[in-house]
Amino acid sequence: MLLRPDRRDIVIIGHLTGLVLIGTGLVMFIPATLAILWGEHNEAAAFVIAGCLAILPGLLMRLRARSFRPPRWDHGMIVTAVSWLAAPFFAAIPLFLSGHYGSFLDAYFDAMSGFATAGLAVINDLDHLARSVNLWRHITHFMGGQGLILIMLSLFPAHQGAMGMYVGEGREDRILPNVVHTVRFIWQVSLAWLAVGSLALWGALLSAGMPLAEGLFHAISLFMAAFDTGGFAPTSAGIGLYHSPLTEAVITVLMVAGCLAFALHHHLWRGRWMQLWHHTEMRLLVASVAGLFTLMAVGLASSGAYTTVGELLRRGMFHLLSAHTGTGFNSIPGRLFVTQWGTLAPAAIVLAMGFGGMAGSTAGGIKLIRMAVAAKGLRQMLRASVLPRDAVTIESVHQGQRSVLHDPAIRAAYTILLLYLLLYAIGAAAGLFYGYPFTEAMFESTSAAAAVGLSVGITGPTMETGLQIVYILQMWLGRLEFVAVLSLLGFAWSTLRGRT
Amino acid sequence: MSRNIGQVSTRQALLGMSAVIGACALIIAMCEWLLLPAEQLPSLANLPRSELDLPAEATCDDRLRAVRRRSTSRALRVDSASLIECPDTFDGRAVEYRGEAVSAVLRRGGRAWLQVNDDIYALSAGPLPEHRQSLGGNAGVAVNVPADTADAITAVGDARHRGDVLTVHGVFRSAAPDDGGGPSILATTVGQRQPGGAVSSPRSARRVIVATLLLAVTVTAAVRSRGA
């Protein structure tokens, strides 16, 4: 029986959502400051306007609601779902005011794509985009990859209900006993990687012939897109602009680092390197990459796309890892997946995108742990069916420590797996409705729902509005892994139809 | 049926949602008002979207025929769309390609890499910041040019510049061995160069005023909320 929420629930949700928007608005003053330094005055004003508009709702809630009862777990989930709709709205304002978007919906699409670390884009004339706006697109990857709730908890740490919001953003791993300490650790790791990764990229780009200042700009932007497995690039040519195997290698390391769970980063940070060997998701990642690359290599060889093993390895492995980690960088034009790569190699890409990275990382997709749990659950069922009735079959996974799999965990994995497959199918059906071939519609839908960003050309400034809305919803649902969104829908239903 | 006095009624919920939607609509309307006005381009409807302007469903044979019709020399006068849609058709062929150099010139010993765009911004309308009309995305292909050509380039396209427009003669490779299999044109000569230049757009006094007002309101609200 659903009970109607009362005003205090609305106040709690409004207050916490307001804090997330305050955080989002404050971050916008970074590109605003840089825009002033770079002489981009129209863009600077746009960031100030957007930042203030984002901050004001939160401040108004603080003025109206001076005290309220502690939030529950479900409040946290709802706040997460609402925040992930509201924050892109305000983030879209400077994008729209740049003049590079045909409509506010287009700007909202790119903002959602940024926060969801998808990397699909509908921007017009990216190659002539103001530098501050270009950087903002990459900052949205950094914010979304770290987590909007994480940013809010960093700025306003003393909050009950933090765990509900933290989990609602698709994070289940409790790295440290206290959520606030966990948040601090995640920032510690990310900023360390930012320093090292940006420097490494800068060096690689300089060796590729990039000018000094331009190289630094590209390095920082590319780092945010790679480590947060986003996929926006500073130019329309993507990673293909640089023609640099060293740059691609550094980016590959960052993409893989980004798809590792932060809990695994914690073990590595503490010197426990053997965790890489024991970790179930790491083992599955290696096996999956090996298997899918074999499929891809057969496909590329039979299509005749490349004449040497070196070319096949470089282009094939880069795009496979880009897809599997959920980054979505491409070093060749995306249309070549259709016109040059045949059918089998793109199918390997689709599978990689669908599987995704590790749970508790910035990657999207079904997640390797769920694939592992589902496979082990199936194995347990098969063993139970052939072994004597009294036999005890146990399956376990290792995520830092070994834990036995029980039925609820197996059921939960299958539920989310099926929801993702349904999401991929719905997006593909929408593509078919608009007349795209099945293979292309499936590719683009999986890319959107798994927040990857590789595109065969369906996503662009001229894409259909209905399809745009479908992909926005896919990115939202996929990034939050359904639970927070279902909480929001339940809350909305109870508000309208709940019992008094 | 009695209702807990604190509970939200359906009417209140719908009013609340309408208020939120209304506020969003107001913000979007304000953003539309703050957009810089678009320049009216002459005969915008007649500007080609690409050099060939073929429909998306054109086959590779259609593209090859169209390219041959407009080519006056042995080199095929191609566009980036044809090269990417039909890489095998044009692989290894002598081509002529025209476009705007964008992003950066990457010098590598005796040669340099360029990204050369042939979209509507490159060859017809000019960079978007100049006219502020949304005319689609970018399209181009990588070109590998001799070092002396790279030295002669005066501007590359970015937010503040229209890049030099180059006419490149060379060979198209769908999987260039010197680029690990990436598609590119290996340029032998680069003729006819139109120098690029600075691009400017007008400053918006409206935005500055609105930004200043909003900043003042926000700071006031922040001070009051801290005091509350």
Image (cartoon, coloured by chain):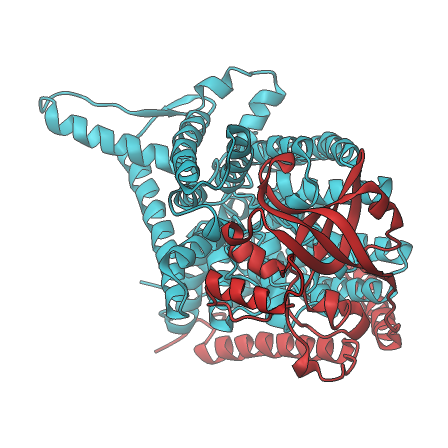
Residue A412 as seen in the image, left or right of residue A10: left
Q: Can residue A94 be seen in this view?
A: yes
Q: Quadrant of residue A438?
A: bottom left
Q: Which residue is drawn at 50% across and 29% down?
A: A309
Towards the viewer: A157 or A3 = A157
Q: Is residue B20 above or below residue A407?
A: below
Indicate whether A120 appears above or below A435: above
Q: In which quarter of the image is the C terminus of chain B?
A: bottom right
Residue toward you, B59 or A399: B59
Does residue A171 sit above or below A110 in this rendering? above
Instruction: Point out the residue furthest to the left here.
Output: A388
Going by the image, does B133 lie left or right of A312? Answer: right
Q: A318 or A20, which is in the foreground?
A: A318
Residue A26, given in percent of the width and then of the height, sits at 76, 55
The residue shown at (87%, 70%) is B212
User: On screen, A456 above or below A65?
Assistant: above
Give the percent coordinates (x, y) of residue B37. Answer: 78, 80
Colour chosen for chain B: red
Residue B50 in the image: state x and y as whole percent. 64, 68
| Chain identity for the colour cyan used in the image | A
